[in-house]
Each structure stands twice: as C-alpha cells, then as structure tokens.
Image (cartoon, grey):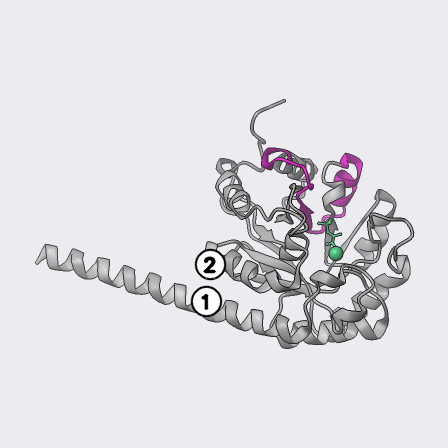
Amino acid sequence: MELTPRLADRNSAPTTIVTAGTAVFGDGGFALVGGPCSIESAGQIEAAAAGVARAGGAMLRGGAYKPRTSPYDFQGLGDAGLPLIAEAGALHGLPVVVEALAESHVALVAAYADMLQIGARNMQNVPLLRAAARTGLPILLKRGPAATLDELLFAAEYVLVEGNGKVVLCERGIRGFDAQTRNVCDLAGALRLKELSHLPVILDPSHASGRRSLIEPLVLAAAAAGLDGALVEAHPDPSTALCDAAQAIDLEDFARIAGRVRVLRSALATADREAADAAEYDTESAIR
Ligand code: PEP
Ligand code: MN
C-alpha cells in the first residue's frame, strides 16, 4: 500500500473549503449541523428543521435508511423519508445531509439531499464511495468504528480520485473497551487529521459519546480546538426518538450550544486580535 494518500494529503492542495448549499466547511468557521438520527414523520423533521434554523444551524441532518445493529429495530422510513427532509430543509432555508446506506440508494438520495453521508460502517465500501463521488455532491465521510486515520484518508482518496474534491471528514468515535461511553471520542485523532490533510474535519459527539449530557462539552471542545464543525443529533422530543434516543438533545439545548459556540469563537478571535496587536506594538517599539 502506498504510505500516504496522494490527493487527500495536506501537501497536495491548499486548505479545502467544502460547500453544501449554504453550508460551508473549512473556511475557518464552525458549521453546526443538527437534526434527528432518523426522519420519523413530516411533523417531526419539520419541527427539527425549525429548531435548527432558529438556532442558526448550518444544515439539517436526518437518516432515511438506518444501519441498526438489530434488524428488529426501526430501520428508518426508507425512500419515503427523502421528500420529507427535503421539504423541511427548503421550508426553513437549510441544506440537508442524508446517508446513502447502499450503492442502490445513491441516485435517489442525491435527488433530494445537498450532501451525501457515508456512514461509519461503510467507510471502506469502495463501490459506494465511487458511486457517491460520481454524483458530484459533497460527501460527509464518517470514520469507521475501527478504522485508522490513514484508512479514513485512503477512503477519502477513493472519492477524490473520481474527480470529486468535496469531502468532509467526520470523527464519530472509535470502538473501545469501556461501555460508559458508546465509543471513544478521538478528538486528538480529529485534530491530527487536520495536520495530515487539507480536507475539513468535523466531530459527531452524538455517536462518539452516546450520552446527551456530553454533547455540549464535546461540541465546545471541538470548536475551541479548531475543528470545522459538528454533527449533532437533535430531536424535537428526544424521549420519543425511534433511534438513538439516549444521545439526542432537544432543540432548546441545540440553540444553547449554538449560542455558546458563537460566544466562544468570538472570545478566541478577540484573544487572537489582542495578541496580534501586542506583537505589532512590540515590533514598533523595537524599531523606535
Ligand atoms: C448516523 O449519523 O445516524 C449514523 C448512523 O452514524 P454512524 O455511521 O457514524 O454510526
Ligand atoms: Mn444515530
């Protein structure tokens, strides 16, 4: 195997900015994507869209096809979910991201979504990666639960070699031994990805932790650390969520997180400006 990916490598291109409709990843901002694990009804996804838009979220998420551990659990609405999320997004001015679980879904998902999600379980599904890439849509590529960073970058490479440079990488937790959190949130790994690649990197704290109580601090950590955004499961009524209820936050929490991210980023920008001003003052005094 070649040791470094050719196109995803940091040195192969300037920092990549990926746009999905009005959502922007990698421009120095922080794109907060929110919405339920699965699209459940027109009313549910519309309420989620309203809450995400009100909070200033960048994009609406929702799954139509769910890769559940058990075949007896809710599998998503399937094709019928796609027009529901597209309409909810359009109504509230939000672009939408939906997972294509199989190659056979790609064309239909692409007809309704602004961005295609490739799920963790499919990170190395090469025919799916190639088919998704060929739609020309931006791709949200999740790290596999047991994939190394290099394997994730080579998975991205499969999209890039198809001529589609619009890839956003997503850390969503890797398999660990401790059941106290659903997965191990590899924040350091996500930051390392930004050193290794020019592609934007976001964090999914929902699948990484599996716990509602940990979503806010993890999003703040991602924003403070300089990641490019977060993908957060938010539901109008988490207690009734048909999928991943324990990690779903409500829309009030989503709005509070969005507000705190804005304040945090502006405080960091102020600190950077003050440091730059102080350095300039020092240089001027040295010249005089
Ligand atoms: C999801 O985003 O709902 C999902 C199924 O995520 P993952 O592929 O990371 O498990
Ligand atoms: Mn989920």
Along the line of sight, the residue nearer the viewer: 16 or 57: 57
Q: Are marks 2 and 1 in contact (CB under 8 Å)?
A: yes
| The residue positioned farthest toward the left in the image shown | 288
Could you tell me which residue is drawn at 65 percent across and 41 percent down?
177
The residue drawn where x is 34% and y is 61% is 272
Task: Examine the image and state in which quarter residue 33 appears.
Answer: bottom right
Numbered badge on residue 97: none
Left/right placement of residue 226 relative to residue 110 reads: left
According to the picture, the residue beneath numbered tag 1 turns out to be 264
- The quarter in which the C terminus is drawn is bottom left
What is the span of residues highlighted in magenta in the rendered image? 125-151
Q: Is residue 236 above or below residue 122?
A: below
Query: Neighbour class for label 2 at 10 Å: few (<14), some, many (≥20)?
Result: some
Q: Residue beneath label 2, please?
A: 224
Residue 14 x, y percent position in the rendering: 49, 44
- In this view, 1 is above or below 40: above
Residue 141 point in image, percent of width and height:
68, 46
Residue 132 covered by magenta stretch: yes
Three-letter amino acid code at disc 2?
A: Ala
